[in-house]
Image: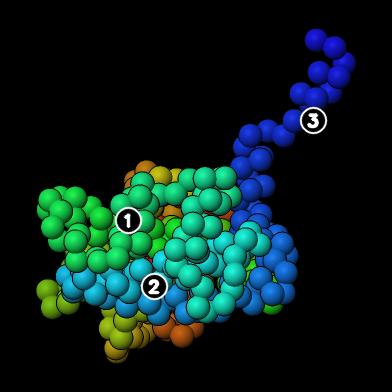
Amino acid sequence: MNSKQVLSERSSPCPSMSLLRRLWDGFLLRPVKRRLRSYSAGQARAIRELCAAAAPLTEATQQHLDADDVGAGIELAKEAALLYARAAAVSQQEAETEETADPVKAWATFDRLLEASAFGAPPAGFRAARELFVAPDTRSWAELPLEEAQARADSILPVLRWLRELVEPRTLAQVRYLKWRRIAALVLVAALAAYIALSPRNVALRRPVLFSSKHPASTATDGELVDGVISSTYGAHTDAEQTPWVMVDLGRPRKIRLVKIYNRGDSAFDDCLPLTLEFSEDAINFEEIDTRTTPFSIGMPWTVSPKDKITRYLRVRGKKGGFVALNELEAYE
């Protein structure tokens, strides 16, 4: 291998990079802008006029085909297809642009360009649809075998879409506007993703909750303490007992930097005090992290910063002979 071959191999772009470049170019609409810049002012104007005339015909074609009115759908499709074929020929500087252009001549021009590979490969149903578009009497399709007639009818809309995509009727200003909208949307999505990735995550959310007991009249469900909803009542309520507590299992040991505990929202706000927050890795040996003796509420929760202590279980213990009633518990890594 000589030095020129080595240099050529080194300078050849990686296939994945080439794919990314094409995707990025497509996102920024660069191929669309290149196509538009290839048109003269007269071409661009004629293409816009022809496509604008074809668009409502295409929509009406779909409506008729959806309603099984195939005959009317074919008649409309013939008009739309002719307009798109003329626009495609105009894009190659090969066609007359008068509104009264001869259909036979227009399709002959289009067929010649298609054979010259000016438009790439047509969809699979092109030939079937093409016969319908130039047939003098489209009622003859109904005399075909059922499967063939259905195949031809099914080919109409895909072929119309393909014909439409052969040209670009938008203006450069419209494409630039769309490009900047795409960029703005991408920036917004990236900012949102970064915000989500960098935002603290509540690792207690929807984790299992254990109780020393439940008050007989409690209306709270087992997981309501960590459901992410600050309610007007409470998410956990034990019975009055010697050592009342509620405990959240984080599933595995985690380094916790912040705990937020929200008081009940209905009444008897301070009857549980004092409350003690405890950490444990085995649910047997607990370390006291903080004790709350002053009132707290939904709007002003009990906030504890445990300095990145590692724990799996967070337990809130009440006073002897008392009970624990809380609204929500959150823990952040």
**Residue 227 location, x and y as percent?**
32, 68
Residue 11 image label: 3
Q: CA distance from mark 1 to mark 2?
A: 14 Å
Q: Earlier in the sequence, mark 3 or mark 2?
A: 3
Q: Nearer the viewer, residue 143 or 169?
A: 143
The residue singled out by tag 2 in the image is 79
Q: Secondary structure at mark 3?
A: helix
Residue at (30, 65) in percent of width and height: 136
Q: CA distance from mark 3 to mark 2?
A: 50 Å
**Residue 160 location, x and y as percent?**
40, 63
Rendered view: 56 above or below 154: below
Question: Is label 3 or label 2 in front?
Answer: 2
Q: How is the image coloured?
A: rainbow
**Residue 286 location, x and y as percent?**
41, 51
Q: How many numbered marks does the figure carry? A: 3
Residue at (72, 69) in percent of width and height: 40
Alpha-carbon neighbours of circle 3 within 10 Å: few (<14), some, or many (≥20)?
Answer: few
**Residue closest to the far top:** 1
Question: Is label 3 or label 1 in front?
Answer: 1
On screen, residue 27 versus residue 2, left or right, reads: left
Residue type at mark 3? Ser
**Is residue 290 visible from the viewing direction of this image?**
no
